[in-house]
């Protein structure tokens, strides 16, 4: 039987890669042979990686013994029919690796490349933090260069976008669209286990928060409702050509600098949405990728008085991740905001727009109520970051994000 749009095999492969690799590889081989009949593929190998939260990659071996590299992103419940704009990104000036073979329809989106020997920036940062490499100045210089280049591309491709065109952008699958089906699938009628706290999700969303001395009087329920309004796809405004999902797992660290790949959500869309994934995942999300390790090393105290959840913890981005954060904020976001303001294209709610997009990253990339993946401490960290990203503190110490945004806002 041929593959039809809506085929779920890629989703099954992604879910199986960590628990039953052999079965996943068997499914994958059949999928590749049907999708690319002109490729004489003998074997398909998966590389289960911590960074592969909604994706998978690995190698294909052809009958002549040669190998190719593949990557795919899966998005259950997607409302986007077409993915991937590698050619558009290349034409805009991005150093992006173009696939040799591509299937881009929903349900069978799959890119095949020549084998790439460079490490991903995700792996580089892991090695840096583990003390296995000591070239942070060189890596930082490459990041500075990449961010300067990113700003140049943003400004060169900047133009107004109609509400109709904006609504078609694939990047909304990572934000607004996840606030519907994925949010319900993750959290409807669920309980969540937190350190010393066990709550129904709906009750948790009605609580106020105090995190490391900062008080947030708005609730997650209010922020989620607001996000559905503010992040609506049918919103005219500024647009750029962007990768859409440029976290460190989708960036190679080559001898000549940073190189992008897997442009599943590439296209023309709002620049603040384009910045959200790298800003959050590259800086704040170590608990998401390595939950057991973080749970063993992080200190936390949490209480619930029935009105406010009080949390104190010592999880903070490492020095190297703060370098990446500062670069993106100073070299891209700050001058971008200035230029949008100069051109009278800066939305009055630009800060809320960015913060609510950032909130979607810890809340909707993975299910925080999944106790098989997240120990209670990591689930609480995810909630703390969702609150800090999406809400404004109205008392106490400002978090890192809000301090920098205050500076940019002037």
Image (tube, rainbow, N blue to C red):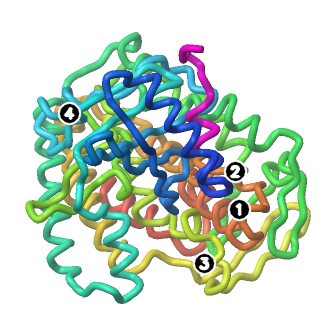
Q: Magenta stretch containing residue 8, yes or no?
A: yes
Circle 4: is it few (<14), some (14-19), or many (20+) Cα within 10 Å?
many
User: What is the crowding at mark 1: few (fewer than 14 residues within 10 Å), some, or many (at least 20)?
Assistant: some
Say the numbered circle drawn on residue 294: 3
Magenta-colored span: 1-13
Q: Nearer the viewer, mark 4 or mark 1?
A: 1
Mark 1 / mark 2, whichever is N-terminal: 2
Is the C-beta separation of discs 1 and 3 under 8 Å? no
Q: Which residue is mark 2?
A: 367
* Picture residue at 16% right of the left edge, 56% below the top: 146
Residue 278 lies, in percent from the top left, at 37, 53
Report whether 390 appears left or right of 82: right
State the separation of the CA atoms marked 4 and 1.
34 Å
Residue position for label 4: 89
Asked if the residues shown at circle 1 and circle 2 are in contact, with their CB atoms under 8 angstroms apart, the answer is yes
Q: Quadrant of residue 344?
A: top left
Q: Main secondary structure of the magenta part?
A: loop
Secondary structure of residue under mark 4: helix
């Amino acid at each position: 039987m041929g593959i039809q749009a809506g085929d779920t095999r890629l989703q099954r492969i992604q879910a199986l890669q960590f628990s039953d690799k052999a079965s996943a590889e068997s499914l994958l081989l059949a999928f590749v042979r049907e999708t690319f009949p002109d490729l004489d593929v003998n074997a398909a190998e998966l590389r289960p990686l911590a960074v592969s939260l909604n994706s998978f990659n690995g190698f294909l071996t052809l009958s002549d013994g040669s190998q190719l590299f593949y990557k795919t992103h899966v998005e259950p419940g997607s409302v986007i029919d077409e993915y991937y704009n590698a050619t558009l990104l290349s034409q805009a000036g991005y150093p992006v690796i173009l696939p040799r073979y591509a299937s881009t329809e929903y349900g069978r989106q799959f890119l095949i490349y020549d084998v790439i020997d460079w490490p991903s920036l995700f792996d580089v940062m892991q090695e840096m933090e583990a003390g296995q490499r000591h070239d942070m100045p060189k890596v930082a210089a490459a990041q500075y260069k990449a961010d300067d280049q990113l700003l140049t591309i943003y400004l060169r491709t900047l133009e107004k976008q109609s509400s109709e065109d904006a609504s078609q952008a694939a990047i909304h699958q990572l934000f607004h669209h996840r606030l519907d089906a994925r949010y319900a699938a993750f959290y409807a009628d669920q309980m969540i286990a937190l350190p010393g706290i066990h709550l129904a999700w709906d009750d948790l969303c009605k609580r106020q928060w105090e995190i490391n001395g900062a008080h947030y009087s708005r609730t997650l329920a209010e922020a989620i409702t607001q996000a559905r309004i503010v992040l609506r796809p049918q919103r005219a405004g500024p647009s750029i050509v962007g990768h859409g999902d440029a976290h460190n797992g989708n960036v190679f660290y080559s001898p000549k600098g940073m190189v992008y790949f897997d442009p599943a959500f590439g296209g023309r869309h709002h620049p603040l949405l384009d910045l959200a994934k790298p800003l959050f995942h590259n800086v704040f999300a170590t608990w998401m990728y390595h939950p057991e390790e973080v749970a063993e090393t992080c200190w936390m105290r949490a209480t619930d008085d029935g009105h406010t959840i009080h949390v104190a913890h010592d999880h903070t981005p490492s020095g190297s991740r703060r370098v990446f954060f500062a670069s993106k904020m100073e070299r891209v976001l700050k001058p971008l905001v200035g230029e949008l303001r100069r051109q009278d294209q800066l939305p009055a709610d630009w800060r809320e727009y960015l913060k609510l997009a950032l909130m979607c990253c810890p809340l909707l990339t993975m299910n925080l109520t999944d106790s098989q993946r997240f120990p209670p401490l990591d689930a609480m960290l995810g909630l703390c970051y969702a609150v800090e990203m999406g809400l404004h503190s109205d008392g106490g110490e400002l978090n890192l994000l809000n301090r920098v945004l205050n500076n940019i806002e002037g």
